[in-house]
Amino acid sequence: MKAGRAAVMKNPDKNAVTIRTIAKMANVSHTTVSRALNGSELVKPATRKKIAEIAQQIGYVPNLNAKSLVTNRSYMIGIFFTNLDTGTSASFLTDVIEQAQSILPKSYSLSINGVDNAMDGQAISMTNFDGIIVISQSESDDGFIEYVHNTGLPLVVLNRVIDRHDINNYAVGDELGGKIATEYAIRLGHRKFGLIQGLPSFESSKQRTAGFMSAVKEHRITVKPTLIKQGDYRPKSGNVMMRQILSSGDIPTCVICENDDMAVGAINACIELGYQVPRDISFIGFDDMGYSKYLTPPLTTVRKPTSTIIGMGVSRLVQMMEDGQPSDIEQKVIDPEIIVRSSVRNMNKTDLME
């Protein structure tokens, strides 16, 4: 009998464990425990650590349903992507979700949605969320952004520069990215370019194309229209468009792909048709997805500062949800950078011409 009781004491029923249980074990008030578990800076770091360790040891699980009833909050954040079903690449989607989850306080959960679904009248109630993040690719999102803004919910718009000054907005310098990618290839001696574009309705594609065109114009390079192809940001379109370029009989020395997914498809097309990369054709991608360094050859690409804008956006959203709407509005554009790997041949070195 004594052994049985001892076992019960060592493994208490998790459902019976409360904040007051932890408070008694830590010899602090239940208010201090509540603050510590929510990461409050009002509690000393050493005390927070002690309370967290006790909570883990006894298997404490916070009751978010009860917590939401008391605070009138859902602890749910809605992330809305442009064209989730057809326009947003799976790799970009995964990258954003993983980074958002790593930054958010553990008490919050994410709900992933498409802007198009919300605007088509599907049952997505804004009352389900404490805050909204819009990963915007297109001006077609503006109606949804205006709708959410009018609800008064904490809102941040990421990825695209929006044409208004009353919403927190963190975006990427896509035009600069397209330009620095092209200028890097030009410095390595490339003068005959192909371009595989992203979705025409996406602002990122428009800006990256503008950067490409700006670079070739400044260097007085003519790009044949037959070497500019319209993709959709997905690997298959990169493969199909590259096959069209190769079948034209007018082979470029370097192809700029407006994201890494299309670059993967394009490189595979070359390999399937007997071309070597980068000896025969060089490639530059965009986004610096996690897999790009592991391709053969590793892909030279433009690193999109996704982690930076996600970090800024999530931090701002949490601030608004916890402390209320700030009087100032933040709007920032973060510059990308070229990540040099092995997929671009240096045409200036004659010993590589063989």
Image (tube, rainbow, N blue to C red):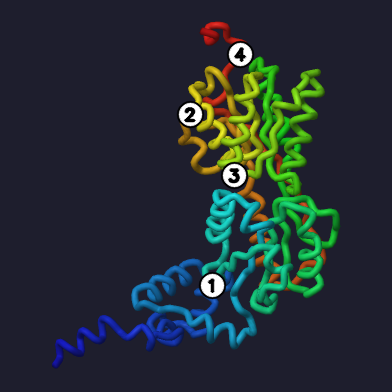
Q: Residues within 10 Å of mark 4 (few under 14, many from 20)?
A: some
Amino acid residing under circle 4: Met
Q: Secondary structure at mark 3?
A: loop
Residue at numbered disc 3: 234
Residue at numbered disc 4: 347
Hey, which quadrant is residue 56 in on the image? Answer: bottom left
Give the label, 4 or 2, closer to the camera. Answer: 2
Q: Secondary structure at mark 4?
A: loop
Amino acid residing under circle 1: Ser
First in residue order: circle 3 vs circle 2: 3
Residue at numbered disc 2: 272
Amino acid residing under circle 3: Arg
In the foreground, 235 or 243: 243
Give the label, 4 or 1, closer to the camera. Answer: 4
| Cα–Cα gap, marks 3 and 2 | 18 Å
Left or right, residue 229 beside residue 8:
right
Q: Secondary structure at mark 1?
A: loop
Coordinates of residue 86 in the picture (x, y in percent): 63, 54
Coordinates of residue 251 in the picture (x, y in percent): 63, 20
Amino acid residing under circle 2: Glu
Left or right, residue 108 beside residue 157:
left
Hey, which quadrant is residue 322 in on the image? Answer: bottom right
Q: Residue at x 80, y 60 (%)?
A: 142
Residue at numbered disc 1: 107
Q: Residue furthest bottom?
A: 1
Q: Residues within 10 Å of mark 3 (few under 14, many from 20)?
A: many
In the foreground, 6 or 262: 262
| Cα–Cα gap, marks 4 and 1 | 54 Å
Left or right, residue 322 beside residue 95:
right
